[in-house]
Image (cartoon, grey):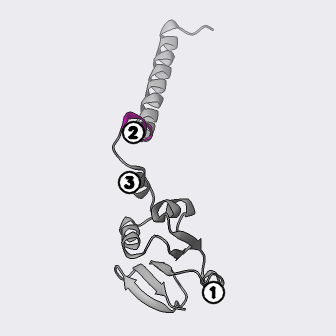
Amino acid sequence: MRRSGSDDTHSQRWAVWGVIFFIAAYLFVALPSFIDALRPLVGDSTSYYELIFRNNVHVSPVLVQFVRQNTPENVTLLLGSNWYPAHARYFFFPRVLIFGNEEALSQHPDIDYVVVWKDYPDFPVPGEKLMLDDERGLIKVLR
């Protein structure tokens, strides 16, 4: 038995509306990310520095500024594993960075400062504290 023409038209309409809905939903979800990806190409004035801070929960911009202002450029810093090495090197350049724990502190006598952030360091560091607040700051290592 053959289907009538109106049934075929009805099915085609639903298929067209389904495709339109799928495309609209995809654009609704993907368009903001696409626009964000294009911003650097169309001359957005946001710097690389600002982009990393905006998109990275592992970096504290206030702490970065505090460390840069309170340490000379020729020091060695000890940071915890909660930092992304590439980002930290970018923010703290030209300072030398070492990532590690108490063992790294004992193995590297050239470490001048330990960067304090949240629960790091979780080991005693002999030195003078220079704190930004309760969770962020520096310890100048005394040897």
In what element is the residue under mark 2?
helix
Camera-nearest residue between 32 and 68? 68
- Is the residue 135 above or below the residue 30 in the image? below
Q: Who comes first in sequence, dot 3 or dot 2?
A: 2
- Is the residue 107 above or below the residue 88 in the image? below
Which quadrant of the figure contains the C terminus?
bottom right
Q: Position of residue 20 (x, y in %)?
A: 44, 25
Relative horizontal placement of residue 21, taking residue 83 as reference (left or right): left
The part of the image, by quadrant, that contains residue 30 is top left
Q: Who comes first in sequence, dot 3 or dot 1?
A: 3
The residue at which mark 2 appears reads as 39
Camera-nearest residue between 135 and 110? 110
The residue at which mark 1 appears reads as 106
Relative horizontal placement of residue 15, taking residue 47 as reference (left or right): right
Residue 50 tag number: 3
Q: Position of residue 116 (x, y in %)?
A: 46, 79
